[in-house]
Amino acid sequence: MIKKEFMEIISNKEIALDTFELVLKNKYVSQAAGPGQFLHISLPGHTLRRPISIASVDPDACTVTTIFKVIGSGTKALSFCKEGEMIDVLGPGGNGFSLENEAGSRILLVGGGIGVPPLYYLGKQLAAQGHKIVSVLGFQNKESVFYEERFKEFGEVHIATDNGSYGTKGFVTDVIGNIGEIDRYYTVGPIPMLRAVTEKLAGTPGYISLEERMGCGIGACYACVIPLKGEEHGYRKICSEGPVFEANEVAL
Amino acid sequence: MDLSVKLPGLDMKNPILPASGCFGFGREFSNFYDLSKLGGITMKAATLHARYGNPTPRVAETASGMLNAIGLQNPGVAKIIQEEVPFLAQFDTKIMANIAGSTAEEYIEVAKSFNDTDDVHALELNISCPNVKEGGIQFGTDCMMAASITEQVKKASRHPVYVKLSPNVSNIGEMAKAVEAAGADGITMINTLTGMQIHLPSKRPLIANKTGGLSGPAIKPVAVRMIYEVKQQVNIPIIGMGGISTAEDVLEFLLAGASAVAVGTANFQNPCVCSEIIDELPQVLECYGFNSVQETIGKGIQ
Ligand SMILES: Cc1cc2nc3c(=O)[nH]c(=O)nc-3n(C[C@H](O)[C@H](O)[C@H](O)COP(=O)(O)OP(=O)(O)OC[C@H]3O[C@@H](n4cnc5c(N)ncnc54)[C@H](O)[C@@H]3O)c2cc1C
Ligand SMILES: Cc1cc2nc3c(=O)[nH]c(=O)nc-3n(C[C@H](O)[C@H](O)[C@H](O)COP(=O)(O)O)c2cc1C
Ligand code: FES
């Protein structure tokens, strides 16, 4: 269940271009959070909270790791937060990824930019269940790449960069045609990427995780809705019923 | 400290209600605290049929506030009465239903639907939503239309009717007097101020609806000024709102002439804010030399 909690900053460091790894301590959140869920972070001087995915947890150390990219004033303020400070979060928010797969499945993770972090937590869990993991991660350029080694801990990793400065030149969809048979995929990233990935993998069952501007982050304000496929007035709230959906459930 | 206030249909243990549209139908917030603590609850707007609302993005942050253009998304009045009102009725608090529509007939139908339930204690006539193309705002910016729809809804409803005023008018006092003369039992004010934000990367309005309603601390001085003006021109009670986020803000609204207050946007920043304000209000009143909420109302008016 989502709760309002204070989390202590254990560390906050730049791990790639404008990309920060923020480690937070809080017993409840570290033990309650599943892959695909997010923290809704309050920042001084900002009316609205900022949703940031959970990139991994360590329930024994009571820590939660997030990775965020500096986009505007909220994430900039978060990048200035220092070790020892407390931040106010609502968490863990939303519904995460389903971990139910047939034993020994070959699973594809497709992440674009700041969509990569939640896949790390997911991949670790799926690998621990004995599945084979293939990760395809897309970034703008070489300087933006992060966590390649971490993803290699549990499987095969392919990197694509928009300008070709690292890995394959192009988009994640340019890579996923060449990775062979898969049983299921999970993808997180900007909507155009999700659209391209779900089209390319149309015959394969998959899950997607969506982003939208949020008000409350808990399902009360209807700011973050997405229409359901083929149903008039049908919708889902991304913050509380998502951010994870089955690939065919919503109209991208 | 006596926090109770008595308004038409709303005999409340304290003067704090969450504002319409900022609290859904209470379910999500009931995970954070016991809703029985609240003086009352204003439900999200009800229309006759289910509405999907506007395209996204529907919200944007501004300095000390936010813009929203949700577009009255709701499951329709029948579902609200069937599924949401019974949930809220479990709590020891008063329930105000916010009603909206595109035509006078729709408002009347929605108002009539609430006659079927005793668990709703008052109606809030939302003639001031800036985010729907038809109806809504026009009713709220034209005195004659506002009076006419108030009169018709009053006739149709067995519940006390509060009319929610739009700040997007040049003479708020005239609007207030018009709806009072038409039979309104109370006034709620203010709804959001129409605003816009341009997204620099796309060079276009950020909100898909282009304009949105500004709420939050940014609009508080406007709300206080308007309540102060209206209080001197009408004899029906005012439920004040617009940027309230602390117990001190509540006192400011009471002094300006509000008999109760609603808290909107602040619930997004802190889902426990209404509960915390209720806890802090007695100390704040005491600090400024008051023994009850009742004696603060309108004290700021010379
Ligand atoms: C469920 C979810 C998970 C996310 N996980 C991550 C993550 O792990 N790492 C990461 O770097 N980013 C993540 N994001 C995106 C992140 O929330 C935005 O980049 C961030 O809110 C931008 O805030 P800002 O103040 O820096 O930017 P501004 O553009 O100044 O923000 C202004 C407003 O727009 C909202 N906003 C802007 N961009 C987005 C966006 N892409 N999605 C949602 N709201 C947005 C902000 O919350 C704020 O209310 C996630 C978004 C969602 C919805
Ligand atoms: C996201 C959002 C949705 C709203 N929806 C409604 C609504 O359905 N009906 C209504 O009368 N007012 C609605 N309002 C207006 C609020 O009830 C309130 O009048 C306004 O936001 C000012 O108060 P605040 O500054 O405390 O938020 C909405 C406001 C917001 C921010
Ligand atoms: S952000 Fe309020 S319903 Fe999702």
Image (spheres, rainbow, N blue to C red):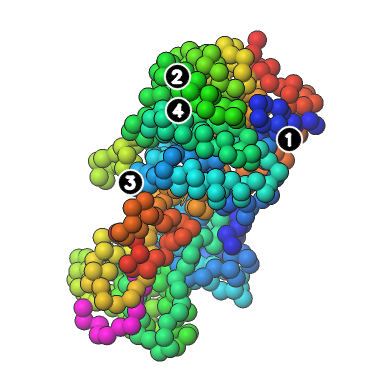
* Quadrant position of residue B287: top right
Q: Quick one: A49 or B298, which is closer to the camera?
A: B298
Tag 3, which chain? B
Position of residue B171 measured from the top left corner of the image (x, y, whole percent): 45, 14
Dot 4 or dot 3: first in sequence order is 3
Query: Taking A233 as reference, is A7 above or below it?
Result: below
Dot 2 or dot 1: first in sequence order is 1
Residue at screen point 38% across, 57% down = A211
Q: CA distance from mark 2 to mark 3?
A: 31 Å
2 and 3 marks in contact (CB < 8 Å): no
Say the numbered circle drawn on residue B127. 4
Dot 2 or dot 3: first in sequence order is 3
Question: Which kind of residue does numbered mark 3 sit on?
Answer: Pro
Q: CA distance from mark 2 to mark 4?
A: 11 Å
Query: Are the residues under marks 2 and 4 on the same chain?
Result: yes
4 and 3 marks in contact (CB < 8 Å): no
Say the numbered circle drawn on residue B55. 3
Secondary element under disc 2, as helix, strand or loop, is helix
Say the numbered circle drawn on residue B148. 2
Residue at screen point 68% across, 41% down = B93
Query: Are the residues under marks 4 and 3 on the same chain?
Result: yes
Q: Which residue is mark 1?
A: B13
Dot 3 or dot 1: first in sequence order is 1
Query: Taking A149 as reference, is B171 above or below it?
Result: above
Question: Which kind of residue does numbered mark 2 sit on?
Answer: Ser
Question: How busy is the neighbourhood of tag 2: few (under 14 within 10 Å), some, or many (20 plus)?
Answer: some
Q: In this rendering, which labeled residue sits more in front, label 4 or label 3?
A: 4
Q: Is residue A150 magenta?
A: no
Q: Quick one: B207 or A89, which is closer to the camera?
A: B207
Query: Are the residues under marks 2 and 1 on the same chain?
Result: yes
